[in-house]
Image: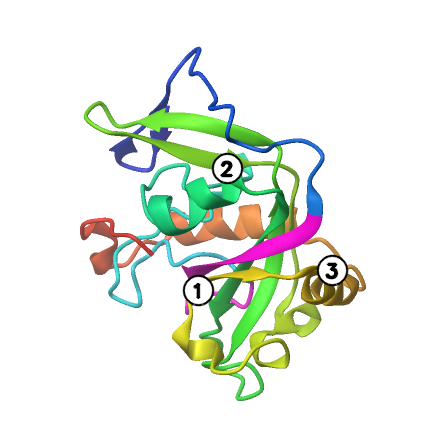
Amino acid sequence: MSCGSKQVATVRNAHVPSSFVLKKLEERGRLQFFFHSPSSKLPVRDVRNEQRRGAKTEPHLEEAAENYCARCYQRNSIVPFLRSDEKYLFLFTTAKRRERRYRNKRFIVGYIVKRKAIRRTDGTKKWWAVSGPTKMYYFKDAVPLASLIRNPMKIRVLGLDPERTAKVLQRLRKGRNILRKCLAELKRLRRQPNKSHQRKRTCK
């Protein structure tokens, strides 16, 4: 199995730690940051490395997963999320669209419902990915992060209490799930790579 040019595989028969909570989850969530593609009006990751932070693999919408190809945020987000009774991994980004209404503002644009813990390896190191039903939304239907917390530009990960989780879900569910459009958009962007696409992949 591969993630672009990076060879990554699933560890077969991997034991899922008993400390991981995958059932009887509470209506709470956790924020997870990713870099937005400046070439897209849709909320997809920067696969072309246009922000010069490395070509991004996460959130790996192709597998409805986070940390599927990269080991980023294992200790301070992914593993703690798997060990918690939090149900939703909320995906947020700094919009790089041209419209002043959105540009350089942060939005929660989708979420992954925790269902599976997947053990991954690149041959030398192993890590955990989280996977489950995934939904993505247009920026116009997204939740401005500033409506939930102070200083939204200073965070990458953060837990949300039930009240704020409910507020996010209520807003997003008024919109239309555009996951399929996002998947098509990722394919389009990969077909038109820029010169910086070949640079080393980095964490988010």
Pinpoint residue 149: horizontal percent, then vertical percent. Answer: 57, 77
Check if mark 3's residue and mark 2's residue have beta carbons within 8 Å.
no
Q: Which residue is mark 2?
A: 130
Q: Earlier in the sequence, mark 1 or mark 3?
A: 1
The magenta stretch spans which residues? 27-42
- What amino acid does circle 3 point to? Leu
Determine the residue positioned at 37% across, 18% down: 11
Farthest-out residue, top: 13
Residue 78 screen position, x and y as percent: 44, 44
- Asked if the stretch drawn in magenta spans residue 48, the answer is no
- Helix, strand, or loop for circle 1? loop
Residue bearing mark 1: 36
Determine whether 83 is above or below 169 in the image: above
Q: Nearer the viewer, mark 1 or mark 3?
A: 3
Q: Which residue is mark 3?
A: 169
How much space separates mark 1 and mark 2, taking CA atoms? 20 Å
Instruction: State the image coordinates of residue 171 (x, y, percent, origin top left).
Output: 76, 67
Q: Position of residue 27 (x, y in %)?
A: 72, 50
